[in-house]
Image (tube, rainbow, N blue to C red):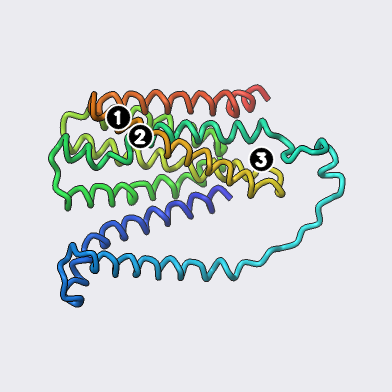
Amino acid sequence: RSTLFTLSSALTNLGSFFSTAIGGYLPGWFAPLLQTGPESTLAYRVVMLLSTGLLSIGILPVLLYKRTPRQVPAQSHAARPAGRRFSNPRLLLKLALPRLLFSFGASLIFPFLTIFFKQRFGVSDATLGWIMGITGLMAVPTMLIGGPVADRLGKIRTMFYGRLLSTPLMLAVGLAPSLPVAVGAHWLRSGFMRLGDPLFRSFAMERLPEKERATGASLMSMSKEVGSAIAPLLSGLIQVRFGFTPLFWATTAVYTLSLLALYLFFLRPARAR
């Protein structure tokens, strides 16, 4: 299961690399056929329609899925108190809180990372597109080895160590004296950070009862989106008054809190057992 989740994320990042690399050229390719400019609304609209068509094709395999009925023993839900929707609400909180913290910390800086590179190092749009495209590509190797490593060390321990390595690299991006150092730290940080998400989702699905997995996955996604909704607004206000440097320190601090939550909720109890 760990290999399946990490392989899925690796393929997603691989596809992101090619789409980022090619997508910037598509309006220019369509413009002569449409007799319009490469930055016109019509050219962008055709590219978006092409993207919609590709997304629609992705629905077809899902339609082929078949539910396999399982016989669940009647006593499996006997211990749940009457009127309680979840058998273990505390577990849901423990699964959602680290994702909320990671999402909040990441959203302080990542929506504006392209602006940071342009302002700090004056890179061109073409260079910036390749930097961000290769970011996804660099995450593929770490994700592919993540499954086998997790099978040996455990999902949470592998995720914890990966994000522990990525946290100081985040600070290195913000304090780097040159573009190559900042980009190298960013690529390494992305690889170690993205390693953890598929492992954590796999871990959560194993801990939750089957009938609660869909709702649990929704709550985990919601906790991630809450951080993504609040942090960018706060980040914009800080950028206007203080610049980017405090944001890198704040992100590192929030990441550290999330790592502490992971340790207290899952690693320390496992070590005690």
Q: Residue at x 49, y 34 (%)?
A: 100
Q: Number of labelled discs? A: 3
Residue matched to label 1: 237
Number of residues whose C-alpha sits closer than 10 Å to that of mark 3, classed few (under 14), some (14–19) or many (20 or more): few
Residue matched to label 2: 233
The amino acid on which the numbered mark 1 sits, given as a three-letter code, is: Leu
Residue matched to label 3: 207
Mark 1 residue element: helix
- Report whether 137 appears left or right of 206: left
Q: Is residue 162 visible?
A: no
Q: Residue at x 63, y 36 (%)?
A: 92
Residue 126 lies, in percent from the top left, at: 17, 53
The amino acid on which the numbered mark 2 sits, given as a three-letter code, is: Leu
Q: Of callouts 3 and 1, which one flags the residue occurring earlier in the amino acid sequence?
A: 3
- Labels 1 & 2 near each other (Cβ < 8 A): yes
How far separated are the C-alphas under marks 3 and 2? 34 Å
Number of residues whose C-alpha sits closer than 10 Å to that of mark 2, classed few (under 14), some (14–19) or many (20 or more): few
Q: Nearer the viewer, residue 241 or 136?
A: 241
The amino acid on which the numbered mark 3 sits, given as a three-letter code, is: Arg
